[in-house]
């Protein structure tokens, strides 16, 4: 069964190679194109050095558009931040927050983006105030629903209510699949063990997570087991992560326009051992989702102390998994 779901990549997935100078912007584009993942998502300050504190030269913008054309790609999303705590002792004034969002709307428009991603910490009133400007620029502002938050969290409900009340189609959601962490990621456990967590405690935390034991109880039990330092750090990850239900996306599907395909590890069998992508894709299909799933690899930081990071291979494996789950048709030349 085929669907209208499309494949993309957040270039954030290649942060390790980018910052080490191993991949240029064109390398990232070519890599994605070779995988058939033609939707491109960026974090502005990773891809365009100096943004947002410094303006970006037109030559860099021209290079971006040339690469979009050369690789027949689609500019999907510019992921922006809002530094509302940049002033010591006071919050950024409301009007300045709105102006900052408008600046990123302009930047997204320069890049030909469909969407700009807003951090989940941004107040709904700020986004609602910026929505008319986004409409003028033909851009949608998508709040990222990211663990530990979820679609039943009061903060997200507050956004949903504000979006509906505004009547604007320029406001929506971008769910991060990391909120559906059904198992404790193996690469996390292995890193914590290398950091000094005793095997017995690591095994307990992993089992407790899968048994859905309340995080505060796990932390207390780890203390009683003699855990300290890294062991408590491992236990405290349970405060941030949880296994929420993918089906909760269905009630919000009319405002979901992009999806972060978060993953920490793809094994040789093209399986993400901690996130149930088979169920996630079934829900997206059921809801009639027609946007992109953009790969977002975050396993690099968990293995770089002991292993060579190969973000390209990890993203390739996830793209192969997504191709299968989506039911992407085989090109006729290959199917013959």
Image: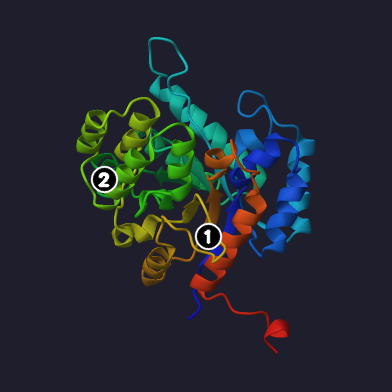
Q: Which mark is residue 195?
A: none
Q: Secondary structure at mark 2?
A: helix
The residue at the point 33 percent across, 41 percent down is 200
The residue at the point 62 percent across, 43 percent down is 307
Placement of the C terminus among the 4 image quadrants:
bottom right
Residue 81: % across, % down: 50, 32
Q: Would residue 68 appear left or right of 228 to someone viewing this image?
A: right
Residue 270: % across, % down: 54, 65
Residue 209: % across, % down: 29, 47
Q: Would residue 72 appear left or right of 78 to someone viewing this image?
A: right
Q: Which residue is mark 2?
A: 157
What is the count of numbered marks?
2
Considering every residue shown, the one lying at the far bottom of the view is 336
Label 1 packing within 10 angstroms: few (<14), some (14-19), many (20+): many
Front residue of this view, candidates 301 and 51:
301
Q: Would residue 247 appear left or right of 146 to someone viewing this image?
A: left
The residue at the point 38 percent across, 41 percent down is 199
Q: Which residue is mark 1?
A: 292
């Amino acid at each position: 069964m085929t669907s209208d779901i499309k494949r993309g990549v957040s270039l954030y997935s290649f942060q390790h190679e980018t910052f080490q100078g191993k991949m240029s912007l064109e390398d990232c584009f070519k890599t994605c194109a070779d995988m058939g993942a033609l939707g491109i998502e960026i974090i502005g300050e990773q891809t365009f050095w100096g943004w947002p504190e410094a303006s970006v030269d037109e030559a860099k913008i021209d290079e971006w558009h040339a690469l979009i054309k050369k690789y027949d790609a689609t500019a999907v999303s510019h992921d922006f931040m809002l530094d509302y705590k940049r002033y010591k002792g006071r919050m950024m004034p409301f009007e300045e927050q709105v102006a900052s969002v408008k600046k990123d709307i302009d930047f997204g428009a320069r890049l030909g983006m469909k969407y700009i991603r807003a951090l989940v910490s941004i107040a709904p009133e700020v986004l609602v105030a910026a929505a008319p400007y986004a409409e003028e620029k033909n851009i949608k502002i998508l709040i990222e629903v990211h663990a530990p938050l979820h679609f039943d969290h009061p903060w997200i409900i507050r956004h949903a209510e504000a979006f509906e009340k505004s009547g604007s189609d320029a406001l929506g959601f971008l769910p991060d699949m990391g909120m559906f962490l059904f198992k404790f990621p193996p690469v996390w456990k292995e890193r914590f063990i290398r950091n000094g967590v005793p095997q017995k405690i690591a095994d307990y935390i992993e089992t407790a997570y899968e048994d859905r034991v309340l995080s505060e109880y796990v932390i207390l039990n780890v203390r009683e087991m003699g855990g300290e330092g890294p062991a408590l750090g491992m236990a405290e990850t349970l405060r941030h992560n949880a296994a929420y239900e993918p089906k909760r996306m269905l009630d919000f599907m009319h405002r979901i326009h992009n999806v972060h395909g978060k993953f920490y590890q793809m094994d040789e069998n093209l399986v993400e051992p901690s996130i149930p992508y088979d169920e996630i894709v079934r829900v997206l299909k059921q809801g009639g989702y027609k946007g992109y799933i953009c790969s977002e690899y975050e396993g690099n930081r968990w293995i770089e102390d002991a292993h060579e990071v190969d973000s390209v291979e990890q993203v390739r494996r996830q793209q192969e998994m997504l191709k299968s789950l989506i039911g992407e048709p085989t090109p006729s030349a290959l199917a013959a």
